[in-house]
Amino acid sequence: MPIMLNKIPKQVRYLISSGLNWLVDFLAFVALFQLVGIPAAIFCSRVIGGVFSFATHKWLSFKSTTKPTPREVVGFVGLWLTNYAIVTILVVATPGGTNVLVLAAKFSVEFVVFAANYLFLNKLFIPKRPATIV
């Protein structure tokens, strides 16, 4: 990892990584939602964003240099499914259904789950230190 990144606090790296992930997800959603409908667009944008997100959070946000473990993959997929369900339900439930309202709803919901995701990913990607017996 470049030396410059080593000096950036974890929370700031998470913010940068999340911003990039959100941009990838949101651009995919914008490109797709009128073509395939809201639920399918959210699913596709989540898959695209999820792959990008796993890599950037593991290696950039939390500076993990290990290969992905089954625990990390299963935990991330669980988080992905939870976020997908929350976003889909709330965006589909948006009254009015205009493009502006749909995009505003997606942005708002994503913002709310942002902090919870940090707490979960911090536990997932930071390796547990073995207990020491004193």
Image (cartoon, rainbow, N blue to C red):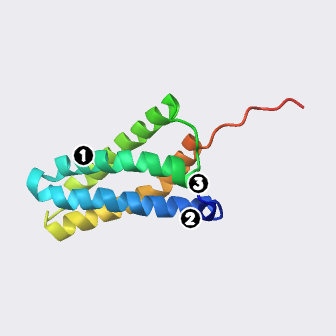
Position in image of residue 101 (x %, y %): 20, 68
**Can residue 54 be seen from the camera position used here?**
yes
Q: Which mark is residue 12?
A: 2
| 47 or 91: nearer the viewer | 47
Residue under the point 24% across and 46% down: 43
| 65 or 130: nearer the viewer | 65
The quadrant holding residue 134 is top right
State which quarter of the image contains the N terminus.
bottom right
Name the secondary structure under disc 2. helix
The residue lying furthest to the right in this view is 134
Q: Nearer the viewer, mark 3 or mark 1?
A: 3
Residue type, label 1: Phe
Q: Nearer the viewer, mark 3 or mark 2?
A: 3
Name the secondary structure under disc 3. loop
The residue lying furthest to the front in this view is 2
Tell me if mark 1 has few (under 14), some (14-19) or many (20+) residues whose alpha carbon lies within 10 angstroms of its own.
some
How far apart in space, not on screen, are marks 3 and 2 (Cα)? 15 Å
Horizontal side, residue 58 vs residue 46: left or right: right
Q: Are marks 2 and 1 in contact (CB under 8 Å)?
A: no
Name the secondary structure under disc 1. helix
The residue lying furthest to the bottom in this view is 100
Position in image of residue 2 (x %, y %): 59, 59
Q: Earlier in the sequence, mark 3 or mark 2?
A: 3
Residue under the point 17% across and 46% down: 40
**Can residue 93 be seen from the camera position used here?**
no
Q: Which mark is residue 1?
A: 3
The quadrant holding residue 82 is top left
Residue type, label 2: Val
Tell me if mark 2 has few (under 14), some (14-19) or many (20+) residues whose alpha carbon lies within 10 angstroms of its own.
few
How far apart in space, not on screen, are marks 3 and 1 (Cα)? 32 Å
Reading the image, the residue beneath label 1 is 43
